[in-house]
Amino acid sequence: MELQGRNVVVTGAARGIGAALAQRFHAGGANVVVADVLDPNPVADGLERAIGIVADVSTEEGNIALIRAAEDAFGPVDLFFANAGLALGVDLTTPEEDWDLAFAVNIHAHRWAAKHLIDGWLQRGEGYFCSTASAAGLLAQIGSAAYTVTKRAAVAFAEWLSITYGDRGVRVSCLCPQGVNTDMLNSDIGGGTDVVRAAGDVLEPAEVADVVADAIATERFLILPHPEVQQYVERKANDHERWLAGMRRLQARVVGPG
Ligand SMILES: NC(=O)c1ccc[n+]([C@@H]2O[C@H](COP(=O)([O-])OP(=O)(O)OC[C@H]3O[C@@H](n4cnc5c(N)ncnc54)[C@H](O)[C@@H]3O)[C@@H](O)[C@H]2O)c1
């Protein structure tokens, strides 16, 4: 999809990867809604064709209100980028409310947004849903059960959406990075971000946004800013037992016993 003249919503765009995506899409000619539960205006104010919307995507109502506000500002949404995410939860002792919030933001938000966009997209014969999952959604996040599970669900949901609506004009992409230099990575998840750093290069958000823009131009489903993730996924598929044993060694070395 060409970005020029398109109406784009990016959630979790007050900082980090989302802010870089908003800036990159704007540079590509899009009208951009910068949405976040934090103040999005420092990012939106720096862009000519953008508005900031304070939106909490952890509820269905929050997603509905965001979509309505975006439509009021620019018209129908062409590309919705469900990027907001939380690195929440460690192990089996993680409180229920943290599990609930991780599910709400990391996966239910994607489902709620799609639910309230799909009819318009099918009527118009086109629409683009993109989500930020993680390499952890294809592999695992050592040190965080909730992150692993919810990001795996995000990948599965994006696949399902593509399978179900891909032949009716709805394009879907799923961003699965490893380490990116943001507040999330630097705040650590159960010691697991040491693993992320050990696994490969830590990219800057703007580098990730460039890879995403290329993938959207060619409408590629799986977006891997760290190409080595493809290899890890293949190794996992080829020998699950060996992959699990390797992950246990990594867990023991970097995080310690569970
Ligand atoms: N940084 C990494 O290494 C990395 C790697 C893989 C995937 N990711 C994913 O990338 C996405 C962006 O993360 P980031 O690294 O830029 O982290 P970040 O913490 O800098 O940004 C996440 C943004 O999401 C917003 N957000 C959280 N809950 C929200 C809610 N309920 N409603 C609206 N906004 C909400 C936050 O306010 C924040 O601005 C996340 O989905 C994250 O899981 C990050």
Image: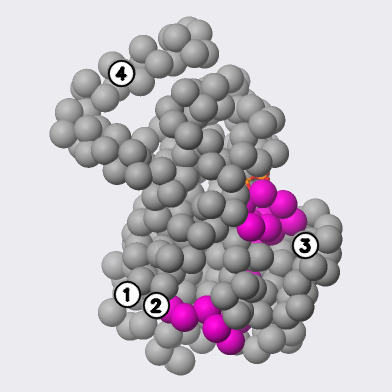
Mark 4 crowdedness (10 Å alpha carbons): few <14, some 14-19, many ≥20: few
- Whether residues under marks 3 and 4 lie with C-beta atoms below 8 angstroms apart, the answer is no
- Whether residues under marks 1 and 4 lie with C-beta atoms below 8 angstroms apart, the answer is no
Disc on the earlier residue, 4 or 2? 2
Q: SS class of the residue under badge 1?
A: helix
| Marking on residue 43 | 3
Residue at left 36%, top 12%? 249
Residue at left 59%, top 70%? 25
- Whether residues under marks 1 and 2 lie with C-beta atoms below 8 angstroms apart, the answer is yes
In the picture of the structure, the residue carrying the numbered disc 1 is 166
In the picture of the structure, the residue carrying the numbered disc 2 is 170
Which quadrant: the N terminus? bottom left
The x, y position of residue 107, in whole percent, is 52, 52
Which of labels 1 and 4 is toward the front? Answer: 4
Q: Amino acid at mark 3?
A: Val
Q: Is residue 180 magenta?
A: no
- Which picture quadrant has residue 166? bottom left
174 left or right, relative to 206: left
Disc on the earlier residue, 2 or 3? 3
Find the magenta span and give its range: 1-20
Disc on the earlier residue, 3 or 4? 3
Residue at left 17%, top 28%? 239
Q: Amino acid at mark 4?
A: Gly
| Marking on residue 246 | 4
Asked if 91 appears above or below 13 in the picture, the reply is above
